[in-house]
Image: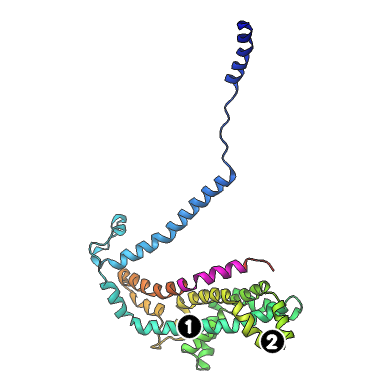
Amino acid sequence: MSEKIVNVTEPVATQTENKPSRKPKISKNKVSSIIITVLLIIGCFAILFPLYMTIIIALKSPSEMTNDIAGALALPQTFSLDNFAEAMRVTDFWHSLGNSVIITGASIVLSIIIHSMAGYAIGRNMSRKKGFKLIYFYIVSGMFVPFAILMMPLVKQTAILGLDNMLGVILLYTVFFMPMNVMLYSGYMKNVPQAMEEAASIDGASTWRTYWTIIFPMMKPMHATVAILTALGTWNDVMTPLVIMSGSENTTLPLAQLNFQTQFGTNYNLAFASYLLALLPILILYIFCQKQIIGGVANGAVKG
């Protein structure tokens, strides 16, 4: 009886031994998560490394600047804010900052008011009337016109009209950002239901009153998005103030930073300190508008 049991169990043992072992499979989700993690690490490094270099160079003295990589990456021997104080003096920081704040703030306000109304009118009527669709494509096509083509005619026209000053720069920025902002606002209108407008119309409200009391507050996330995009473009722009306000005392902060570039080279310590000073206001604006921007992007991604 025992021999039979042995004879029966031996082949089973042999089959088990000869059975190939299965390798664990890596799921597609795990592979994609690994790729995304690696890309995020590379992206963070690409952003943080230049910022690190900017900060340590701004804190170093000119005598600590070296051409070798180890010296460039090394921390400053003594942390000093002398470069920031000198940069503020050379650029006439508070005067230039005030001009940049006025130009940027006025451009943001005008862009939100004018472009939101245009985006509302086009977004509500584009699907029903061909004329609004043609107007939409005409305005958006302005995004593809290079500034170099417009530069010389604008310099001549602004000089003739007496707009070669801060007011002229503000008006130009309002026109420059109109194609992008109108496209954003008209796209956002697809997510705003028309039932609320119809209800207000039944109650006797005019289109003008309906827009300012119902539609305009509902577009607050897109207002924040437009404000940040317009602020970034106007705050960092050098060419428009340079060609329009050349020879004027009302220089903007990016225009004043050109003082660090001479025919003999660039003072990187003062330049980087000035760049950090110019970065703070726009960074503060982004922190305050961050929640609204995320809401605007999320709502804009929903198809109407």
Q: Residues within 10 Å of mark 1 (few under 14, many from 20)?
A: some
The residue located at (72%, 79%) in the rendering is 125
Residue 259: x, y in percent? Answer: 34, 78
The three-letter code of the residue at mark 1 reads: Gly
The three-letter code of the residue at mark 2 reads: Thr
Tell me where residue 175 sits by quadrant. bottom right
* Numbered mark located on residue 43 in the image: none
Q: Earlier in the sequence, mark 1 or mark 2?
A: 1
Tell me where residue 114 sits by quadrant. bottom right
Q: Where does label 2 land, which residue? A: 207
Of residues 281 and 233, the one drawn nearer to the viewer in this rendering? 281
Q: Residues within 10 Å of mark 2 (few under 14, many from 20)?
A: few
Relative side of 153 to 268, left or right: right
In this rendering, is residue 126 above or below 30? below
Relative side of 54 to 144, left or right: left
Residue 16: x, y in percent? Answer: 59, 20
Of residues 184 and 57, the one drawn nearer to the viewer in this rendering? 184
The residue located at (39%, 75%) in the rendering is 278
Q: Main secondary structure of the magenta part?
A: helix
Span highlighted in magenta in the image: 287-299
Tell me where residue 23 sits by quadrant. top right
The residue located at (46%, 88%) in the rendering is 166
Q: Which numbered disc, 1 or 2, marks the residue closer to the eye?
A: 2
Residue 160: x, y in percent? Answer: 52, 93
Say whether residue 292 is magenta: yes
Q: Quadrant of the C terminus?
A: bottom right
Relative side of 13 to 269, left or right: right
* Numbered mark located on residue 105 in the image: 1
Say whether residue 60 is magenta: no
